Amino acid sequence: MPVMTAEMLEAFNREQFPQIDHMGLKVDHVDDTSIRVSMSVQDMHLRPGGTVSGPTMMQLADAAMYLLLLAQIGPVALAVTTNLNINFLRKPEPGGMYAEGRLLKLGKTLAIGEFSLYSEGLEDPVAHVTTTYSIPPKRDGQTGV
């Protein structure tokens, strides 16, 4: 059972990380090892040619990994990305996108995840992502936030 539910993760984002509010992220599913996070793509997320921009897709994958990690370890606001690798596989369509991912490893100081990004209406993934997060050490009396 995850430490944080989908509702708790969304509330945490609103309170602690409002900078990504423009993405309109929704945690559709979270469990002990996996997550599905969706977003509604707006005009600001598109690049010339009418496709979803690469930075938008990277941000979706990064946010999904952050939320998956927090679901497992609790509200540790200072967990940070140390690596993100993305392979763009095909042109995403404007509209909704979602990330489906899983933890490959959850250690004391590092977490590694793998994600597939999908464009609503397309069966095959539009991108494949691997990412690593650094988990800060707990200090005496630290609550995580």
Image (cartoon, rainbow, N blue to C red):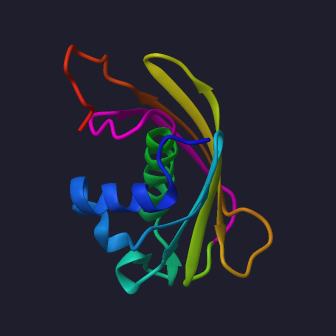
Q: Quadrant of the C terminus?
A: top left
Total labels: the figure holds 0
Q: Hey, which quadrant is residue 77 in on the image?
A: top left
Residue at x 34%, y 33% (from the top left corner): 79
Q: Decide: is 52 above or below 116.
A: below
**Residue 129 percent location from the top left of the image:** 60, 46
- Taking the magenta stretch, the answer to whether it contains residue 35 is no
Q: Quadrant of residue 78?
A: top left
Residue 75 in the image, given as x and y percentages of width and height: 34, 41
> Would you place residue 130 above or below residue 118 in this image?
above
Q: Is residue 116 left or right of residue 85?
A: right
Residue in view at x 43 percent, y 41 percent = 70
* 55 to the left or right of 98: left
Image x and y of residue 88, in percent: 62, 56
* Viewer-side residue, 7 vs 117: 7
Magenta residues (range): 72-91
Between 142 and 40, the residue placed more toward the observer is: 142
Query: Which one is nearer the viewer's eye here, 38 or 58?
Result: 38
The answer to whether residue 30 is above or below residue 106 is below
Q: Is residue 99 above or below residue 108?
A: below
Point out the image quarter for the N terminus: top right
Left or right: residue 97 compared with residue 66: right
Residue 87 inside the magenta-drawn segment: yes
